[in-house]
Image: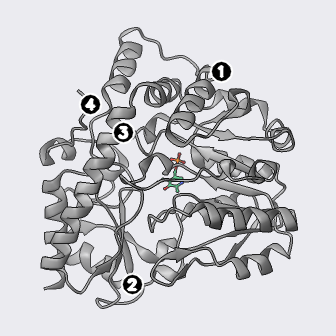
Amino acid sequence: MTTPVFDSPDAARRRRSAKWRTHPADVLPMFVAEMDVALAPPVQRVLADAVAGSDTGYAMAVPALGEALAGFAERRWGWTIDPGRVAPVPDVGVGMVEVLRLLGAAGRPVVFSPPVYSPFWNWVAEVGGQAVEVPLTDDGSWRLDLPALELAFAQRPAAYLLCNPHNPVGWVPGPAELAALVELATRYGVPLVSDEIHAPLTLPGETVTPLLTVPGAADVALAVVSASKAFNLAGLKCAAVVSGSAPMQAVLERMPPDVRWRPGHLGVLASIAAFTDADAWLDALRGALADRFDVLGHLLAEQLPQVRWRRPQATFLAWLDCREVGEGDAPFQQFLDRGRVAVEPGLKFGAPGSGFVRLNVGTSPELLTEGVARMATALR
Ligand SMILES: Cc1ncc(COP(=O)(O)O)c(C=O)c1O
């Protein structure tokens, strides 16, 4: 049985994770990027067996995690990873912060492109770097602003942080654009760090280009990956930093030795099962998410015609243009106060998010329908 099963509304409300316990019970949470999906059966089995056997000690991620990831990357994207160049970390956030430290970001500029996942600012601040924003451009499709990036790269920043695919807009940068980014990075000597946590979650028909598969990228880039977003394992704590060349591996090998002890054992076991045995489940999930976006499109057209949106290429997140409702965080606040539905305020993702909200559709059709109905009620 590979079809993903989404919680009924009652079952979802019994969850105790951040999504379900941050707000009072009368608020429908559609904010933080967790899905209300049952674990893939191979993941359920490995976790149940571990608990039944009291197998809850420290993680032993090397080499099994890298081998499982390498198999997954080869099958899904034709990306050849050397398992010996995979460094386990507890989560993508820790991976990004540790890499920024290794790249000497303290006191130096670090460039990235809003609207983007809000911890990008926090990660740079955590290592004492200076955030330099070069927003995406939007001419009907999203793009990197390559001329502006060139100006920023000429200042020799410590790194450029890529979000591939891009949260919150669900955009998948194409190979030509990534090649242009790699060319700039090579020319100016700027390391690239690619957050690829959403890469397994392309919608059917869309293809992600892992940055390290772009010619020349391996010499200047590191990727940070995880099974946690696609397989809903965020609380189990397992991710990995991947290098693809001797020079970047030399950077990775300076990672403090204790970091390898910090991933969760259950997270490592679950990630290995997910990377090894759950391709069919993942494909069915991608199909289910495409259905959700279909439903969302119909519901918005019927009930919230003033909200504009573009179907994403990846993720389970919808970036909704609510500027007809108000600027800044006004739409978010109105949805929360009057509709009792919690979405993410667009400004959290940087200044271009003024008047936008991010809606999480990784739930049952019933709760998605209820969420949009609550948003519509809020505007009445
Ligand atoms: C782009 C992006 N990076 C990182 C994370 C967080 O990952 P982790 O929980 O592994 O730190 C998220 C979570 O939604 C995300 O969307």
Image quadrant assignment for residue 105: bottom right
Find disc 3 in the rendering and name its residue: 282
What label sits on residue 2 in the rendered view?
4
Disc 2 residue: CB within 8 Å of ligand 1: no
Query: Is any part of residue 220 visible from this angle?
Result: yes
Q: Is mark 2 on a helix, strand or loop?
A: loop
Q: How far apart are marks 1 and 3 (CA)?
A: 24 Å
Kindly report which numbered mark, 3 or 2, lies closer to the viewer in this rendering.
Answer: 3
Query: Sequence-wise, which precedes: disc 1 or disc 3?
Result: 1
Query: Sequence-wise, which precedes: disc 2 or disc 1?
Result: 1
Kindly report which numbered mark, 2 or 4, lies closer to the viewer in this rendering.
Answer: 4
The foreground one among 363 and 340 is 363
Total marks drawn?
A: 4
**As displayed, is residue 326 above or below residue 63?**
below
Query: Is any part of residue 238 visible from this angle?
Result: no
Residue 215 rendering spot, x and y as whole percentages: 74, 52
What label sits on residue 355 in the rendered view?
2
Residue 333 rendering spot, x and y as whole percentages: 31, 78
**As displayed, is residue 87 above or below residue 148?**
above
Find disc 1 in the rendering and name its residue: 63
Contact check, label 1 and label 3, Cβ < 8 Å: no
Q: Which residue is drawn at 34% across and 33% down?
A: 280
Task: Bin the neighbour count of mark 2 within 10 Å (Cα to Cα): few under 14, some 14-19, many 20 and up.
Answer: many
